[in-house]
Amino acid sequence: MDIFQLFSMFGGLAMFLYGMNVMGDGLKKLGGGKLEIILEKLTSNPLMGVLLGAVVTAVIQSSSATTVMVVGFVNSGIMKLTQSIGVMMGANIGTTVTAWILSLSGVQGDSLLANIVKPENFTPVLALIGIILLMASKSDKRKSIGNIFIGFSVLMFGMDTMSAAVSGLKDSPAFANILVMFSNPVLGLLVGAVLTAIIQSSSASVGILQALSATGQITFGTAIPILMGQNIGTCVTAMISCIGTSKNAKRAAVANLYIKIISAILFMGVFYALNAVIHFAFINSSISAFYIAVIHTFFNVVSTIVLLPCTKLIEKLVRLTIKEGAEKNAFAILDDRFLQTPSFAVEQCVTLATNMAYMVKDSFTLAQDCVAKYSEKSDKVIIETERAADDYEDALGAYLIKLSAENLDTVDAQKVSILLHAISDFEKMTDYTADLVFTAREKRDKEVHFSDKARQEITIMVNAVGEIIDLTISAFSGNDVQLANKVEPLEDIIDRLRNELKNRHIKRMQEGRCTVDQGFVFTDYITALEKISDHCANVAAAIIELNDENYDIHNVMSHRRNNDEYKEQCVAYSKKYALPFSVSSDIE
């Protein structure tokens, strides 16, 4: 093997790995995070966990990606340790699909069917379709399909290039001597593990083995221990990813490692024990890419069948290895592992932002009770909520910035942009609920009392703000544009309420029926209420923008205020929240 063949082999490996990466990214984007959401929700049954783990891995073409995702689920508390074990077993089965695809490179024969399935015949067509979809299509979905086709074509071309580069080794005595060493089960297992750990992909390392099998010098006895080692080596990605995570996440990564090690020991123990008695005739025969795929699948299916009933025992072993005391983190669902599947990461951000929105609602309700009758307990809870909202904004904002640096499709990029605006508004709302508490303290300290009529007027504005908060949260959590369109008219009415109440307040001061202290409390109260409604309108505008990429808040809102539907909604809200006409003594 000369230097040029060596360059050709490494060039083929580079194209192989790049093609696998491009195809995997395309598949993930096409899934749009839906597979991960299904995986998150439907893994309570161990058998279902295995099935879903296999399907997800077969689709995204990476057991490492699935395992890292599972570690993230466990770290965030979405998935229990027991559930994760079944999913990781399924991932081991799903990853064998790649080996079957690559085995097509070894198809022989001149029949029509044989020629159709030969990669050199159909991959150029796929590459052509892929480049047309990528360059001519505006749809993110079609572009993802184009990436899948191009990635697959590059992958297969890289596989053929590697096979052609190493084909000259079939007559090399030196290469044959090296392979004899690898037929030692322990050495073969270590070589397979180290190779896979370096490139962090069992599918890629199995592909390299399949390419080398084209030389005709790879025997069953050489391939089997290497395949076992490759299954162990792929654990390194999950082990690295669990650094700095909760103890349960570390347990999930260790469980994956134990599954691979126990499976390899059991399989090799039984196989070599039987070989010592039966002396398998095929052990020194040359192995093809097809039989490498068969053994790879057989090993992972059988090991799953054997170990699945032992899930509880594996969990106990893992818990003995990593002792109890896992910590809980409210922001654990913002796991960097989820950045590998941006669509799912975006959904996690939406979930946390929705939780933040409900914090606003609870805080507002509590603040009204506190203004009516001051409570130190309520005061403390509201201030703690305001600080928690600050933490939410910081954590979500930092994560969304990371997420925006990923290769997002148009929809997800828009969601990230809108979320960055929305969390700021939710945080500001908790600031104003805290202002309501300060108003409550001042009202208590200065012994300010509102008359029945004053309370009636303020209650009308409070109810209007309560409704706008409910509308905003429902629209945000359900991504409901119809509800979002009802927010701005109500905010308009709340502005008018604030202005009318302020005018009445000024008149009372001019007539000497209201003191300065009473005036400050009253003004601070209605100002905080109106500010909350302003930020609700901002969130609603963001929701509308999320669903219309051509939306411009300034142009569209000025246009909407002049249309009939907007005016009708304003009339309905003005009737619902009409103030009493009389301006008699309101504050005592």
Image (cartoon, helix red, strand yellow):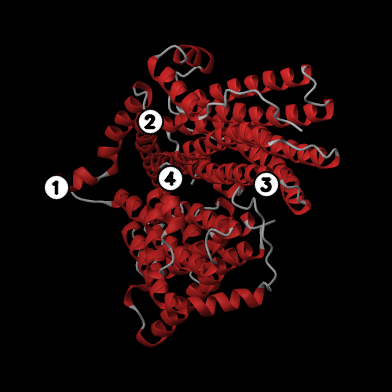
Q: Nearer the viewer, residue 430 or 290?
A: 430
Q: Who comes first in sequence, dot 1 or dot 2? A: 1
Residue 419: x %, y % from top left:
57, 34
On residue 369, the disc is 3
Q: Are marks 2 and 4 in contact (CB under 8 Å)?
A: no
Query: From the viewer's perspective, is the residue at label 1 or at label 2 nearer?
Result: 2
Separation of residues labelled 1 and 4 (CA atoms): 25 Å
Mark 4, residues whose alpha carbon is within 10 Å: few (<14), some, or many (≥20)?
Answer: many
Query: Is 112 situated above or below 241?
Result: above
Query: From the viewer's perspective, is the residue at label 2 or at label 4 nearer?
Result: 2
Query: Is 45 situated above or below 362?
Result: below
Residue 36: x %, y % from top left:
45, 51
Identify residue for label 2: 143
Mark 1, residues whose alpha carbon is within 10 Å: few (<14), some, or many (≥20)?
Answer: few
Q: Amino acid at mark 3?
A: Asp
Query: From the viewer's perspective, is the residue at label 3 or at label 2 nearer?
Result: 3
Identify residue for label 1: 111
Q: Amino acid at mark 4?
A: Met
Mark 2, residues whose alpha carbon is within 10 Å: few (<14), some, or many (≥20)?
Answer: many
Disc 2, SS: helix
